[in-house]
Amino acid sequence: MEKQVFHLVSPIVRRNAAHAIANVPDGYRCEIRPKTRTLAQNDLLWSVLTDISKQVDFVVNGELVKVSPEEVKDILTAGLKRETRMAMGIDGGMVILGQRTSKMTVRQLSELVELAHAFGSQKGVQWSPTSLGRDA
């Protein structure tokens, strides 16, 4: 049996999911979790991260520098969780561990975008139309 995903949006879909669970062979796993972020949310997030990356300086190794959108994401996801996780690099140095946004729920990604907008606005970022949810 191949992987099946049911988006629980109606009684018929719920019935189909229950039927699939009742008839699956032993040893399979069932997982019910919130929907993960949408592609539109992901596009908005990366637009916001890019705007911040181009306009805000961050302190890295004691110097004010521009960082990549990926590094902005790591900084903001650590801020969202209100924790900093660090690991020792394989050849020394420290590595800050960020959170994967692809695993975030719709709500969690909305919170991250809100945090990014608040942070960027506080730093004087001039938002591109796509970072405001508008077409370019």
Image (cartoon, rainbow, N blue to C red):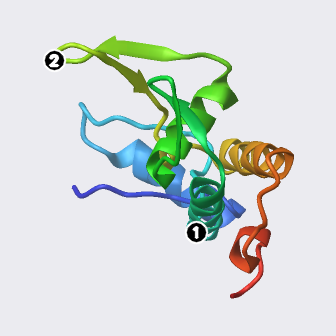
Answer above or below: position of 127 versus 3: below
Q: Report the side of 121 relative to 3 (left or right).
A: right
Residue positioned 25% across, 33% down in the render:
26
Of 85 and 50, nearer the camera is: 50
Of 129 and 93, nearer the camera is: 93
Residue positioned 72% across, 51% down in the render:
113
> Hey, which quadrant is residue 64 in on the image?
top right
Q: Mark 2 points at which residue?
A: 90
Of 21 and 55, nearer the camera is: 55
Tell me the kind of residue under disc 1. Answer: Asp
Q: Report the side of 82 relative to 120 (left or right).
A: left
> Hey, which quadrant is residue 104 in on the image?
top right
Q: Which of marks 2 and 1 is nearer the N terminus?
A: 1
Q: What element carries label 2?
A: loop
Residue positioned 76% across, 50% down in the render:
120
Q: Which of marks 2 and 1 is in front?
A: 2
Residue 122 position within the rendered picture, expressed as x and y whole percent measured from the top left = 85, 45
Q: Report the side of 40 relative to 74 (left or right).
A: right
Tell me the kind of residue under disc 2. Answer: Ile
Q: What element carries label 1?
A: helix
Answer above or below: position of 46 versus 95: below
Q: Around disc 1, counting alpha carbons within 10 Å, would you say few (fewer than 14), some (14 to 19), or many (20 or more)?
A: some
Q: Name the residue under label 1.
A: 43
